[in-house]
Amino acid sequence: MNTFLFPSPIEVIFQLAELFAGGEIIGHIVSSVYRVLIGLFFGIILGALCGYALGLNSVLNGLINPIVQLLRPIPPIAWIPIAILWFGIGNESSFFIIFIASFFPVFTNVFFGVTSLPTIFAKVSKSLNLPKWQNFVHVVFPFSMPYFLTGVKTAVGFSWMVIIAAEMIASQSGLGYFIEYNRLLLEPDKIMAAMAVIGVLGFIFNYLVVLLEKKLLYWRSVSNE
Amino acid sequence: MNNPCLVVDKVSFAYPTNNGSKKYILHEASLSLSPGEVVSVIGENGSGKSTLLSLVAGFLEKGNGKILVDSKKISIVFQDMGLLEWKSAFENVELSLLSSNLMQVQRKNIVGESLSLLGVLGAKDKLPKELSGGMKQRVAIARALASSPKVLLLDEPFSALDWKTKRALQKELLKIIKKKKIGVVLVTHDLNEAVFFSDKVLMLSNGKLKRVKLNSTLFK
């Protein structure tokens, strides 16, 4: 086997250690993490807000949902060329691509959560004369929380997928840029080391959401056994 | 005689059908309920019992006829309880007082009293999933009673309970109802339960409510 094109795991680990020791990869990791966090923040906030707004208001839903459904199937990566034209090469393009990648899963899940509220809970809320805002705080929001967190988990996974593609094309830093740069320099061991870093970062992000889920949805795991 | 706390006067209600016509499920149904009186409405599945309760509770837009009741003074207990899974027994009961102007301390006292009355104060910090069926139903009733209703609507609340639990809960609830002078409408398909629990049994048939005269000693 060609060990240049297919470096062994040991070689990749040594390369990784070298990259960390020399500090070469750290700046790229920080850039990618920063972009993912900012893009996710806006995607999750706006996705959730739109999901709740459209889920709770049928008029708004009738007006806006067709547009959202038209945009939803477009892969986030397809937005990269237009993002470069709008925002140029740099952070803003990446923020935008991650925003697109995280907005739709959060929006779709929250919308589905709100609209699938069981009739019995709506009746309970009405019979207890809860004002709209209390109905939201005590009934709709907690009920939709599992859906919201499912959306967040999907958004996190999507974000790491698209950031790499976005940085390969529309950036001068980040792990995607690092991979593309080392492709041109014919350094497959560095490419694989960067891929391993992406895997670990994705795992950490997902683990943090799972921890949050366990804390917020503790009521789902109790039983009367 | 006391003024009635609920009057249903010649209420009709129809659901639209697929062919564009209307299917009347209630046709000039009437009933009157005095404070402390328990009226059971029996009937076959689909006879309109739950529709009647939904109209009184305000879940459905009123059809023809009149329903006179103070909507702020109605509580309802559902067959499947409707306890919020993410809230403790205490918080579920407290929900019924959130729309009032009571201070938190006052709310806490009322919720405690209500849970105590139903014998579930010890389970106040438990989530619904941690409670048995009987305890869940007690919490649901405590929630309905906490807001001091004048009219209590019971939508087959005992149907999921075993006979012993059901009878014990019915006896306790009857004591509370009579003491607090709450007018009760119980919807059930169990004639035995209706006779045991009520002062008056009404049969809903062909959209109309008719009084059923029974020798209650046969059932009790």
Image (cartoon, rainbow, N blue to C red):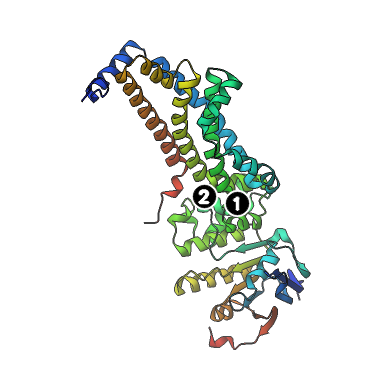
Q: Position of residue A44 (x, y in %)?
A: 54, 34
Q: Amino acid at mark 2?
A: Lys
Residue B87, disc? 2
Disc 2 vs disc 1: Cβ atoms closer than 8 Å? yes
Residue A10 located left or right of residue A140: left
What residue is shown at x 75% (from left), y 73% (from top)?
B12
| A68 w.r.t. A183: above or below | below
Q: Residues within 10 Å of mark 1 (few under 14, many from 20)?
A: many
Nearer the observer, A181 or B82: A181
Local SS, label 2: loop
Residue A107: image location, x then y, percent:
57, 40
Q: Can residue B183 be seen at all in this image of the molecule?
A: no
Q: Does residue B85 appear in this view?
A: yes
Badge 2 and badge 1 both on one subunit:
yes
State the residue at coordinates (44%, 34%): A157
| On-image quarter of the N terminus of chain B | bottom right
Residue displayed at 29% across by 14% down: A18
Quadrant assignment, res B15: bottom right
Left or right of B169 on screen, residue A206: left
Q: Which residue is mark 1?
A: B95
Decide: is A97 above or below B22.
Answer: above
Compared across the picture, whether A20 is left or right of A211 comes to left
Disc 1, SS:
helix
Outermost residue toward the front in this view: A2
